[in-house]
Amino acid sequence: MPATFETARDEIRAAVKTVWDAGTTAVAGYVPAMFYDGVPSASDPDPAKAYARMNVRHVSGRQASLAGPDGRRRYEKLGIVVVSVFAPIGAAGGQTLGERLAQVAKDALEGRATASGVWFRDAVIAEVGASGPWDQFDVTADFRYDEFK
Amino acid sequence: MATGKYDAQVALAKRLLEKYGETAKLVRTTPGAPADVNKPWEPGTPGVTSKNVSAVWLNHSVLRENTLAKEGQIFAIVAASDLTSPPNPALDHVIRAKGARYSIEKSEPLDPSGQDIIYELTAKGVR
């Protein structure tokens, strides 16, 4: 099933959420809250706990093929997914906690693909530094998929 | 109602804002629970509540002379005693008495000793 703008977004978010929900308890002892760009939240993050924020950003696109026998063309879409991980600076193992949680997020993306063909590549963890009471790590990965129409 | 050190100022602010301001409506849109727990980024039907508030509206030249207020921004001073919780820019918007809607960009309390007297809202018209 080829991806669409909507399925790509859903699958990218789900790819991270699935691994995040399954893998973070072993690291933090709880599942840190995940916030999504553009989705309002009734509550603010708890400064005593880690949390993460995910952004999916399409960056560019191009026609990647001529029309086939059915008249359909392939359009390649490229973008970046950013998972910003925030670990409380004062918590036990603060920076290590942040690094391990960022690793969970990176593992959700690196070398992976979704059911409709969203591919992730060049995943990396970048140390951002202190952000209020949290130590921030940004996990970024490029993604690409094809739309047919 | 709990008493605080600044109860008199809270009441004074409310009285003056009622006298010199207008009754605006603070509307809160609370995201609904997602229909699919695996898609928390797709909230369900939101809950919408509104509350009348006494507010004075000011343009930036009155309130913030020589500051870099952005074009289109307007400021409102709202009585804290009209609200049970501070305005939340992520969830709330304001409707003036004449019907114009404004999103809230920032909400700052005047809260000596932690008791909220007024909220100063930085708002922008919703086109």
Image: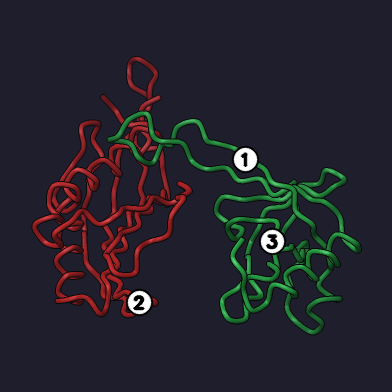
Which of labels 3 and 2 is toward the front? Answer: 3
Horizontal placement of B6 versus B114: left or right?
right
- Neighbour class for label 3 at 10 Å: few (<14), some, many (≥20)? some
Q: Quadrant of residue A101?
A: bottom left
Looking at the rendered structure, the secondary structure element under dot 1 is strand
Which of labels 1 and 2 is toward the front? Answer: 1
Query: Which residue matches tag 1?
Result: B49
Against A113, is A148 above or below? above
Measure the C-alpha gap from mark 1 to mark 2.
Answer: 32 Å
Residue B48 percent coordinates (x, y): 60, 38
Of all chains, the one bearing label 2 is A
Horizontal placement of A88 versus B12: left or right?
left
Residue B102 percent coordinates (x, y): 73, 52
Of all chains, the one bearing label 1 is B
The answer to whether marks 3 and 2 mark residues whose Cβ atoms lie closer than 8 Å is no
Query: Which residue matches tag 3?
Result: B81
Residue type, numbered disc 3 = Ser
